[in-house]
Image (cartoon, grey):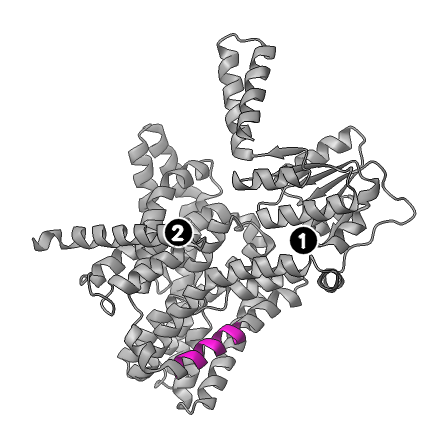
Amino acid sequence: MNELGLLTSMALVLGIALIGGMAVRLIRLPVIIGYLLSGIIIGPYGLGLVQDVENVETLATIGVVLLMFSLGIEFSLKTLRQIGKVATVGGAAQIVTTVALGVMVGWLLGWPIREAILFGLFISLSSTIIVLKTLMDRGELGSPHGRVMIGILLVQDLSVVPMMIVLPSLEESGIALLGSLGLAVLKAALFLGAIFVLGFWVFPWFMRKAAEVRSRELFLLTVVCLAIGAAFGAYYAGLSIALGAFVAGLLVSESVYAHQALADIRPLRDIFAVLFFVALGMLIDPSFVAANPGEVGVIVAAIVLGKFLITSLVPRVFGYSDKTVLFVGSGLFQIGEFSFILAALALELDLISNDLYSLTLTAAVITILLTPLAMNATSVLYHRLIQSERGSRFFAGRLDPVPLDEGKPLMNHVVICGYGRVSKNLGRVLERRKFSYLVIDIDPRVIDSAREKGIPCVYGDAGNSEILAQAGLGRARVLVVTFPDPIATKLTVENARRMNPRLDVVARIHRDEDTEELRNLGVAELVRPELEAGLEIIRHTLHRFGLTTQEILYIVNTLREEEV
């Protein structure tokens, strides 16, 4: 029965993960927590139900590859260029500052200086996979704080390369160390050059050939091969597999096959990602925590508080809002999965003690476990704070809203909260019909772009009553809310209706449970993108069967009323 060992382990891991995920969802916690707790329970330090941990970790690596590949497809080169400065400069500054934090903590605890420096390197990395999954579950991948967090994480992943070179070279002379670094940089440059050449000229041709066969299985196999091939190509070039998969996805995102590739790979990605989170939970040893509660508590507290301050300072320096500052800080305070690799390498080279290795792994899993909770708590706390008069004024002062032209106040205008692709189309239509409108957005780049085009705009969080007061809601005709965040939508509508009870509100929703609450707040029209897409397909289909426009309109409106 040994040949069924891997299958048995997978069945057990997925089954327990299913139970754990459903259990935490019943108490409205993120499913990641359920997966991590499942790993702790069935792992070698828990009940020991899974003995073949190495094979589970190998399969979990595929989850990392597919997650990062899909992130690359959704991210796009244009988005990467937009956040270049805050990611590169801010990310590098964050790493250096966090290493200094680790050295200070090690010095205070009396560790040898080498162990303190290495501990600083370990904690300077955050978990790309945990943050990515949390942002996806919250629908915030495209938000300002989501883009900033992903940019900083990519810089951290790049920094793993010199870190892994420095570790075995600590005993080398300066010239030998420079030689090792130079060779690694050359290999990385050659790999990235090769992947970009393949991405622009070979990938599109190969995917077109796979698509022409009209076999969904072959197209999916092509996509998986591109992702895994790029990941392990990066690994053999001395880079992280996550970075290789991300770059491949980034290049695929520029092709016409990006949407189909993402749709096909998503189910595979989600299943293998579950294995990764469970395998992560298997690393923690509850007995080590029980034997060293004080030291573990001090280290975790120092990491959470220290990294929160450091990572939240980065977007603040680059002019992002307080909301972005808070979410970036609460999302990046954990220790990353690549820290495990660095710690294992340092232990193998006898550079750190077994106690420091266990302490690093334990702190990493605990901080990872806290991340989804912290993101949820930050969201609730922020929106409660700005509902209070003092909190609203504090955050409004920090947001530095762009003043409107006092000499020409807008009248009977549309206030658009969130200026994404849908809102921009609305804006173009309003301009053609000579209707005035105003934009509120929390992304400084969006506001800069709108101002260059002469569009009246306010920089800030539309959920803040002080920011809404800048939009002239008392003179407005319609408020359009396009946020993906349901809490931000509810808060914006509530504050806006308080300022102008007669204001007509159109809001975007994604969840059924938000419908009744928004209706009670006085929203006139609720728009669900997924529902509207389905109704449009129905309209086209019925038109092909010869139904009249009036008949189709009646059917579509009936369905819309039933759903919304």
Q: Is residue 450 above or below residue 216?
A: below
Q: Quadrant of the C terminus?
A: top right
Q: Quadrant of residue 357?
A: bottom left
Residue under pointer 2: 67
Identify the residue at image location x=83%, y=36%. Answer: 412
- State the image coordinates of residue 318 (x, y, percent, origin top left): 65, 64
Give the mark, 2 or 1, whose residue is nearer the N terminus. Answer: 2
Range of residues picked out in magenta: 295-307
Q: Quadrant of residue 163?
A: bottom left
Q: Residue furthest right?
A: 407
Of residues 344 and 15, the one nearer the viewer is 15
Q: Secondary structure at mark 2?
A: helix
Q: Is residue 360 above or below residue 514?
A: below
Q: CA distance from mark 2 to mark 1?
A: 27 Å
- State the image coordinates of residue 409 (x, y, percent, origin top left): 88, 44
Q: Quadrant of residue 206?
A: top left
Of residues 449 and 389, the one nearer the viewer is 389
- State the image coordinates of residue 539 (x, y, percent, origin top left): 53, 18
Q: Secondary structure at mark 1?
A: loop
Q: Is residue 4 left or right of residue 19?
A: left
Q: Amino acid at mark 2?
A: Leu
Q: Is residue 451 left or right of residue 373?
A: right
Q: Amino acid at mark 1?
A: Ile
Q: Does the magenta portion include 162?
A: no
Residue under pointer 1: 442
Identify the residue at image location x=42%, y=47%. Answer: 70
Identify the residue at image location x=44%, y=74%. Answer: 123
Residue 195 appears in view:
no
